[in-house]
Image (spheres, rainbow, N blue to C red):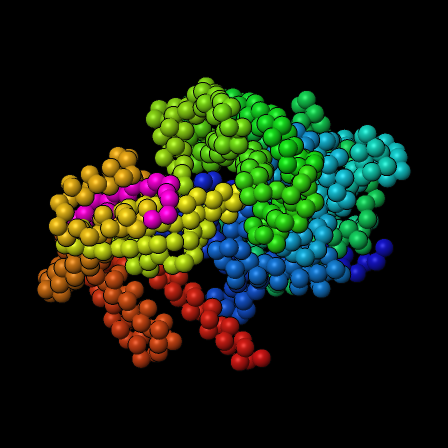
Amino acid sequence: MSRDGHFYLCLHGHFYQPPRENPWIEEIERQESAAPFPDWNERIHYECYLPNTKARVLDEKGLIVDIVNNFEKISFNIGPTLLAWIAAKHPETYERILDADRISRRLHGGHGNAIAQVYNHMIMPLANRRDKITQVRWGIRDFRRRFGREPESLWLPETACNEETLEVVCEFGLRYLILEPNQAEAFRPLGGGAWHDVSSGGIDPKRPYRCFLKKTPARFIDIFFYDGPISRAMGFGDLLFDSKRFLQRIESAKVESPEEDQLIHMATDGETHGHHKPFADRVLAYAMNVEALRRGFKVVNYGEYLQTHPPRFEVRLKEGENGEGTSWSCAHGVKRWKEHCGCRGGGPLEWTQHWRKSLRETFDWLREQLAARYEERASVFLRDVWEARNDYIDVVLERSEETLSPFLARHARHSLGGRERSLCLKLLEMQRFAMLMYTSCGWFFTDLSGIETLQVIEYAVRAAELARDTAPPGTPDMLFEELVERLGQVRGNSSELRDGRAIYEKQIKPRMLSVSQAAAAYAIQALVDDSLEPREDCELYGMRIRMLAYRKEAFGDLTLSLGRMRMVSRATLEENELVFVAVHIGIYDFRCSVKAAGASGEFEEMERIFFEKLYGLQIMELLRKIDALFGEYYYALKDLPLRERVGVISILTRGIIEKISAAQEQLYDENRQMSEIYRSLNLPIPDQIRYAVEHTLTRRLKATLLEMARSRFDPKKAKALSRVLEDARALGVSVKKQEMAAVLALELERRTVRFAAEGS
């Protein structure tokens, strides 16, 4: 064996966030716990995914000497649901991730850094075989579409693995897996010999192993067991505070005078690099681009190393309790995702996780009920309902006629009409949500009321709702009601949200957006937001909206709008034509009534009734006319999704906030001398004045930065910035800098790119 590149280094990042979209609108709603960002995906993108595509390499003086894409230097997987979000919301970050894989293929003999992942992070040993197959197929299809090649491996969520999982993975021709060292039971040389027990975690991670299937020993998959101690120190210790210290720890894993080449490799959550560990993206950049080379390591990925270093040993994996396998997050196998095992994620010590067992049992019951309904109802439209589900990922990835028509041509029993298409897609969506409800994060943390568990219960409710919607006309389907009853038996720890039914009633039910409610939300926003003045076509809440007729007029403190719209679901193609009338009275009082569109001429008659006498009608008389035509039920501001409510309130309060801010600035300017006197006497500024000072200086700092950015950071304008900062220092107050940091980061990036382009 060649002694070139005696020591090899590979670091794997498992980048993943649970899907967070409201299943009724396919959008992420505001998550206050992620403040100042609107949701956790945005926050983690800013802290981790974006900086890792543009990581700063600093010298010993802290000066930037290079900007690199960390994804070019590490093995990585990114969860398909997360990557879809990045592609939609941050296309530049997405493209840099794809570019990194292309570049790595040139550097590593055709082997890319990216590997696939099981689609929605389902714990594979706890899934039935049918779901295992779909999850792997969806993960591979998603990978192929995005990276333009076949994956050599895929990440098993929580590295959870058992024999059936290996069988399914091998069916798809994948070459290798990455597992935790404690998942190995014994190893021996290829070709036979005595087995060596490593069940206590003593397997050597510096070489690959071959694992043969028990039922079909001719089939196998290769396994890399990452270095456990170093990986744990990266994730839970302070190893990522300094690149040199990091590499020193890696060097300590070397075995001098080895008989074979050594691969030292680690695996951690990708979010460690910047989110869990601030600025670890910079440590990683220096370590993999400078320090590793300086210390004689050759940076590789697993595919490249496996090609040049095929396994010389075979391994036997632990079976786990009842053959359910093992994982990297739970010392008890996979119990963390099915029962109270003692592994938890914070919360009071007296809280238990017995709810995990009853929640999984409820979902398993629902899965089987949904499978039976799917087979019965979808078989009317589809030749092989389960093969169609396996293939449905193509439609999920690109919801267009160009994708849907070939899909139906392959799977439909006959040419489907509009209503048949919609029913067929609803049944397939029902199955999609039936898998999403098993996303592992729902069982990982401490209580039933956590946002991750709330999310998977939402998926279950949505799946049951679709089952009800696809029932034959006149046939009662009580599945939804029975699910709610069963959720009432799933008991958590929170006194406010004690069981699954309470979570449904208080947290989920208000988020279930009907078509009429979506129309009302659009109409109410359009009353105050001129940018939403109805156009011919737009997309909102997972629907394509076409405004067929619209009229809005204002008189005094009343604004009235009347519209007729066609709404088509992007996912199911269900089509609804609706008429709405929306009223804005005073400042905060809204109401909107919605009904199905009627016969030709109805809209014109309503327009005549409402607008001819608008200026003469009393408000109560107008509302009575609306109730007479639409019914007494109406939607108010509280019925809008949280994001839209916040948007409307922000527009309504914009003027008031400006007045308050102006008053605060005036207070600051008029009392600046008083503030300086307090500081000269080394006395704290009174709280009543301090707020005005902090608010004013923060506001002026942001305005100055934005003005500088517009002028391409003209050095002459930096004097105004210096004055604001000097005032803050002199008065002993702090300004809120987070928003300004984003402006500066973007400008630094712009200048660096321009400098690099001009320099080349």
Quadrant in which the C terminus appears:
bottom right
Q: Position of residue 93 (x, y in %)?
A: 53, 59
Which residue appears at 76% of the width and 61% of the height? Answer: 109
**Image spot of residue 595 (x, y percent):** 35, 40
Which is nearer the eye, 743 or 631? 631
**Residue 720 drawn above or below residue 349:** below
**Residue at 70% of width from left, 55% of height from top?**
149
In the image, is 50 to the left or to the right of 204? left
Q: Nearer the viewer, residue 28 or 274?
A: 28
Q: Residue at x 45, y 40 (%)?
A: 24
The image shows residue 736, relative to residue 389, as above or below, that is below
Give the image location of residue 678, x and y in percent: 13, 59
Q: Is residue 526 left or right of residue 121?
A: left
Image coords of residue 580 (percent x, y): 32, 45
Q: Is residue 46 magenta?
A: no
Magenta region? 583-601
Does the magenta portion include 598? Answer: yes
507 relative to 662 in the view: left or right: right
| Residue nearest the viewer, comparing 636 with 303 | 636
Q: Quadrant of residue 70?
A: bottom right
**Residue 314 in view in this figure:** no
